[in-house]
Amino acid sequence: MSADLIELVRRLGQPRILVVGDVMLDRYVWGDAERISQEAPVILLHADKREERLGGASSVASMLRALGAQVALAGVVGADFDGGRLRQQLTDLDIDHDAVLVDPDRPTTVKERYIGRAQHRHPQQMIRVDYETRQPISATLEGQLHAIITQQMRKADMVLVSDYDKGVCTPKVLEGALAAARSLGLRSLADPIRGKDYSKYHGCSAMTPNRLEAGLATGLSLHTSAEALDAASRLREQLDLEAAIITLDKDGMALVHRDGRRQVFPTRPRQVYDITGAGDMVLSVLGMALAAGADYEPAIRLANIAGGLEVEKIGVATVTRDEILRDLLHNGAVGSQKVLDRTRLRHEAESRRRLGQRLAFTNGCFDVLHAGHVHYLQEARAQADLLVVGLNSDASVRALKGPDRPVNSEEARALLLAALQAVDYVSVFEESTPLALIQALRPDVLVKGADYRKEDVVGAALVEAYGGRVHLAQFHEGYSTTRTLQKLGAA
């Protein structure tokens, strides 16, 4: 778990963020891909559900709302049914759309996706149909949009540009918006188009092109981390950015900052179902974190988490703070990352408590893991939101069990415990008892085996004195480390 990211999520607050860009409506048709049509060599989709979601810049706005931000959206829709549907969704989500103007000469942009399930299994996108025009908005609309964007900025904490090249983010609109942001001291973050000319983004605080977009804009090939950093450096210098951030799909993100920082932030491997919306999610979380006062490094790390959660979903979907926190808490630490010293573990425990979580604690030598240990630890974990295992050091085990023990080193024992799903953290203690560790952590539940009496459990009186409880876990007959070692001829 990353305690600093947990803390960042906790203090995101409710910043007011203005999103400028191409608003869209995403429509999904779901069904079973049953067979090949008799009329043509195409899949026959037996549709059973239709739904609509906000897309493009309006998707960014909805993602920000799901994260707890106050949001205003600026863009253009058509004077049509789809434009009305889009506006209604914005109203339902309490997104300020006073700056979404109506152009009777253009259709509302709609992306219609057909999602098929093969033999009722996991759905996959089959085809997308777009209804749109890419013509730039008129000079009259440019002037109206500039005026209302400037008005909205006076109430904003951050400005995001979501440019899908549908005609709203013209050079004139962006020039005026970015100049207004600078004059008001607002940061601006842009997700750019796929193209060779990025001059209209000059003066942004930062931008987030993907690998392909950055390659086209710089004329560079981005196959390695070094090449990605070179491209980011070129973009930062050419456009006078505070920071250039290039998203590198499964390889994470590359950052080049005006202060000289050059770093690639890896991301955790994910089960990717649909990359749709991942860029919007990165833009949203970066904007949210920066608006909350975070530096670029933690903001990027948090955006990596949220982007990873997004690709695990079908279509453009939102991610909540709770989802991010659950991912950080339960999946962020693996293997040896779960093994913490007492000081770090105390900080982690304090972070968890601020989130309203309860801590269970148990301890032991765990010299040779067996099924009885697994049953015991699963029961211990079920008593609270996380389980910390205090592990006797090698010296402590020798003092308790004699010079021939432990069989396995403390490093090996800690790693094996950390590999168990029921165990959230492991901490090695040198003392003969875990009392000092219990005093440092103040667990809500102290767990020992039912072969103990409660009055004999080290730390029981302390835990009950501050309102915690002692749980005696079921004893499973037939499992014993000593017996196992005797069978192996080791004791």
Image (spheres, helix red, strand yellow):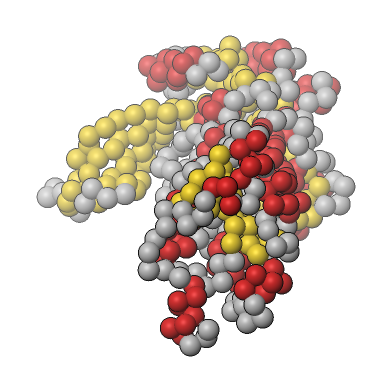
Seen from the viewer's position, the closer of residues 197 and 441 is: 441
Residue occupying image coordinates x 54% and y 43%: 470
Using residue 29 as the reference point, say whether residue 227 is left or right of it. right
Name the residue located 62 percent from the left edge and 20 percent from the top edge: 70
> On the picture, is 62 further left or further right than 432?
left
Q: Nearer the viewer, residue 459 or 200?
A: 459
Q: Is residue 385 left or right of residue 27?
A: right
Answer whether residue 208 is visible to the viewer in this image: no
Instruction: Find residue 20 and report its image quarter.
Output: top right
Task: Mark yes or no: residue 484 visible.
Answer: yes
Give the farthest residue toward the left. 38
Residue 374 position within the rendered picture, expressed as x and y whole percent measured from the top left = 45, 61
- Say which of 459 and 158 sits in front: 459
Vertical order, 426 against 52 (above or below): below
Give me the residue at 37% from left, 31% from top.
27
Up/down of 15 relative to 347, above or below: above
